[in-house]
Structure formats: C-alpha cells, structure tokens
Image (cartoon, grey):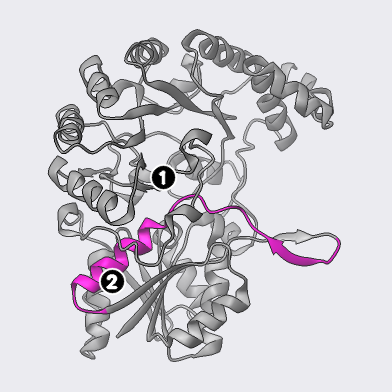
C-alpha cells in the first residue's frame, strides 16, 4: 500500500496589492517526524513517500496527491499549523474520498476526541504520541484487511463514538527505529536563522539523539507528550547516523535538536570522543539546561566540534524561575555560562517574557543576569504562549482565559494574558530588549514601537 506522508503548506502571507497568498516563512529544518515514519514503513516493506509541503501552494499539493495515487495519506499536525493540517485533509478527501487520512503529532495527540468529533468526515484516524510503530501496524492492518481496534496509540470514530486507545507507557527502543529517510529532501533548501552566516552554506541538518524530558516546566508540553520520560540512543547508533549523513549527504554541520541533549554525562562524552575517533569533522550546535553540563563534558564537546550551546534560561529572576519550576538557580546559570566561555564554546540562550509573576522588576533582574553571563549572541526572545499539554494551559483554562473549543478556530495559540494585556507583554519585551540590546531597541523605536505606545506606565501601577 502506498502511503504519502506530508507536512501541510504553511500559513501564507496575503499580498495587499493582489490579495493573493504568495509568501510563506522560509524552510528551517528537514521534517524529521515524517522522515522517521517513511523509513519505518520502508523497513517493514511498505511503499512510503515523504514530502515537505511547507512552501507549496494548495494546487501543487492537489497535483501531488493526484499523481502519487496514495491509498493512505499521513499528515503531521502541530498546534500552530493545525488548520492547515485539517485543510490538507479536506483536499485529500475531495480528490479521492477512498484515501485513508491519518493525522498525528503533538496537537493531534492532545485533542483526538475534539478532532474526530468535528472532522471525522475528512480524518479517519488519529495517531497518539510517537507514531512509528503505530503507523506500521495501521498500514499492515489495511494491507491485510484486518481490524484496527486493538492497536495502541490510535483514536478512531465508529458509529458516532470516538474510541481512544492510549499508547503504551514505555515507548519502543529508539534504536529499533531506522534513520530518517532523506530521499525527498534537498538539505541546501533548509536554512535555520539560528545558524551563523559562516555555516549557512554548509550542507547541514538536525538530528535527534534522544526524545522527551524528565523535567516539568510549567509552560512546556514536552513532558506530557513523551509521558515524562527521557529515552536516548547509544553513542554508536548516533555516530552511525552521523557517518551516514556525512558520506551520503555530505553533511558538515549538525544541530542536535534534542529537548535535552546532555542529560547523560557519560553518553555525551562518549558521543564526542567517538566523533573524534571516527574522524567526523563537523561543526555542531546543541540545546540543553544549565544544570546538565560540567567542565569535562564541555571540554569534549568543544574538541568534537561544538561551537555553540543554546540554554533554556527563560528568565533571570529567581522568582520567575521558581514560578515556572525550571529547577535551577541563577547561580547555576552563571556557573554554566562561565564554564562554557572557558571551554571556548559560545553560550547562547532562550528567554521568555510574561510568565506568571513577570513585572518590570523581574525584567530588570533578567537584564542584569544577561550582562553578567555575557551570551555570545543576542538571546532569542519570546512571549509566553499558552500551548496544549502544559500546566500553564490548564491554569489558563481555570482562569477563564481559554477553552478547549478555542482550537476549533483558526487563531494562533494565544499569549498568556493572566496578568498583563498583549500590549503590556510587548512593552515588557521592548523593555528587555532595551536593557540587553540598546541598538536593536533604537531600531524598533524608529519603526514606531516604544514603551509609551504600549502604555508601559500601567505595569508599575
């Protein structure tokens, strides 16, 4: 059975002169989700094709479906792009109602009942959680004309009732999953803005060496999606994939996009030492927490080609860190950045504005910390957003800020407005920008954005 695995076209930007949709955000990363699904199906003997429709027009998507003549179409469904996933499912069914449409991903995992209650006319099945094993079982059942009722990690509608078979608590060994299928992707088309200019022209990709996170940050949904577990691949398995990427795809730059790359000290050092032993000369980046690094680890990371680490700080205020349950202290932040600088690696960070308890005073504490730890690049700033699966989402529901029915709209996920309006949140973001990057702040002011425009004075009242 031929299965077509798709990421939907991204939200397009309307051209005000022609009133046509003609722009979309640039491609950043190869969609590893559908790549893993394709390789898993192929390993099991099924015909699978993965396509990234990120920058496609809808008519192009329709032509692909007609020309490919799939029997099954799988569609990834993330919260930010959920309605394009539903729209793509509708396109598939309009072309051939007999095609089985399956969706999976974080948003689908958190709202299977809502999705099937409202979209069962265009969506046949919802896969929950990590989908490789589940999808193989589904396709095998379709191929052999068997029932789907006993497959774990699957939701479906029968006779007006939605049935949800939860995935098993313990996920499959990650090393049983074959490496992602890159056959449909041109790596040079993917350019993440997080990669410095000097590395942008190198053939590169991102890889995932572990899944999940054992921590329980208030704003994050990763823990719920992966059941609060962290599962990792062995160093040899990781190195085999890196060698494959170097030999077959010419990869010279890698972004380790694990939610928590360095949780295991010994595994991290082993990966680095084996990169050196196998003479894999790659420039690379990783993401982790400040309480998951030490001097020995950083030494080997630098020696193996790591030039930058992104730390999820979120805030420099002890009160905010406690409120969002980050589980580390400002002192630990300072120590990690000092060690990273000393190792010759660029420490960078992510910051969030607007978590519970945020104020001009906590923004000031964050500014002071940033000047103290001296990140090598401008911190990546975001405003706290309410996402399904997080405890912040449940709190926002209790505050009356959002209901589950919100996700039936086409609106983007909302900012957290439990304590500040959207304008005040933007004002706080500007205040932080002014403190850590005055030049950028001046540029924003020249564009018409400043604190007075957003009534910053209200925040001190």
What residue sits 42% from the left and 13% below the top?
330
Residue 144: in sight, yes or no? Answer: yes
Quadrant housing residue 150:
bottom left
Quadrant housing residue 136:
bottom left
Which quadrant is home to the C terminus?
top right
What residue is pinned by disc 2? 135
Q: Is residue 429 above or below residue 402?
A: above
Q: Is residue 155 above or below residue 146?
A: above
Q: Is residue 391 above or below residue 367?
A: below
Q: Nearer the viewer, residue 137 or 180?
A: 180
Residue 19: in magenta span: yes
Assess disc 2: are there few (<14), some (14-19) or many (≥20) residues with their C-alpha within 10 Å of its C-alpha: many
Are dots 1 and 2 in contact, CB under 8 Å? no
Please provide percent x and percent y for residue 329: 38, 15
Please provide percent x and percent y for residue 281: 27, 36
Element at label 1: loop
What residue sits 51% from the left and 12% below the top?
369
Residue 159: in magenta span: no
Which quadrant is home to the N terminus?
bottom left
Disc 1 from disc 2: Cα separation: 23 Å
Residue 180 located left or right of residue 417? left
What residue is pinned by disc 1? 221
Assess disc 1: are there few (<14), some (14-19) or many (≥20) residues with their C-alpha within 10 Å of its C-alpha: many
What segment is highlighted magenta in the picture?
17-46
Quadrant housing residue 88:
bottom right
Count of numbered circles on the image: 2
Please provide percent x and percent y for residue 61: 55, 76
Q: Nearer the viewer, mark 1 or mark 2?
A: 2
Element at label 2: helix
User: Which tag, 1 or 2, sits closer to the chain's start?
Assistant: 2
Please provide percent x and percent y for residue 138: 27, 77
């Amino acid at each position: 059975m031929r299965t077509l695995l798709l990421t939907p076209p991204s939200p397009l930007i309307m051209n005000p002169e022609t009133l046509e949709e003609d722009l979309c955000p640039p491609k950043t990363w190869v969609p590893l989700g559908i790549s893993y699904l394709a390789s898993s199906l192929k390993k099991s003997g099924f015909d699978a094709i993965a396509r990234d429709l990120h920058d496609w027009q809808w008519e192009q998507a329709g032509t692909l479906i007609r020309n490919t003549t799939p029997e099954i179409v799988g569609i990834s469904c993330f919260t930010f792009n959920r309605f394009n996933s539903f729209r793509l499912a509708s396109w598939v069914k309009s072309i051939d109602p007999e095609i089985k449409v399956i969706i999976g991903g974080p948003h689908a995992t958190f709202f299977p009942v809502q999705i099937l209650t409202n979209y069962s006319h265009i969506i046949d099945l919802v896969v929950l959680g990590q989908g490789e094993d589940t999808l193989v079982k589904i396709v095998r059942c379709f191929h052999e004309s068997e029932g789907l009722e006993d497959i774990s990690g699957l939701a479906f509608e029968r006779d007006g009732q939605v049935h949800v078979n939860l995935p098993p608590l313990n996920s499959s060994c990650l090393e049983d999953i074959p490496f992602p299928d890159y056959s449909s992707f041109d790596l040079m088309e993917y350019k993440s803005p997080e990669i410095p200019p000097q590395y942008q022209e190198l053939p590169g990709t991102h890889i995932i060496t572990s899944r999940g996170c054992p921590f329980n940050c208030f704003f994050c949904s990763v823990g719920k999606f992966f059941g609060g577990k962290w599962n990792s691949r062995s160093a040899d398995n990781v190195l085999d994939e890196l060698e494959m990427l170097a030999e077959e795809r010419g990869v010279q730059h890698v972004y380790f996009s694990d939610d928590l790359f360095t949780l295991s000290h010994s595994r991290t050092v082993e990966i680095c030492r084996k990169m050196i032993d196998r003479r894999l000369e790659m420039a690379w980046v990783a993401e982790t927490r400040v309480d998951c690094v030490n001097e020995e680890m950083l030494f080997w990371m630098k020696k193996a080609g790591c030039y930058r680490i992104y730390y999820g700080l979120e805030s420099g205020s002890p009160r905010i860190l406690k409120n969002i349950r980050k589980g580390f202290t400002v002192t630990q932040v300072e120590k990690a950045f000092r060690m990273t600088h000393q190792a010759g690696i660029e420490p960078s960070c992510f910051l969030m504005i607007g978590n519970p308890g945020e104020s001009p005073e906590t923004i000031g504490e964050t500014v002071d910390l940033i000047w103290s730890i001296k990140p090598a690049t401008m911190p990546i700033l975001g405003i706290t957003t309410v996402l399904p699966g997080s405890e912040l989402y449940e709190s926002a529901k209790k505050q009356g800020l959002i209901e589950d029915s919100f996700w039936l709209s086409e609106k983007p996920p909302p900012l957290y407005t439990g304590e500040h309006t959207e304008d005040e949140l933007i004002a706080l973001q500007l205040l932080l920008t002014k403190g850590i990057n005055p030049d950028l702040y001046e540029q924003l002011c020249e564009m018409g954005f400043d604190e007075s425009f957003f009534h910053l004075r209200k925040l001190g009242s």
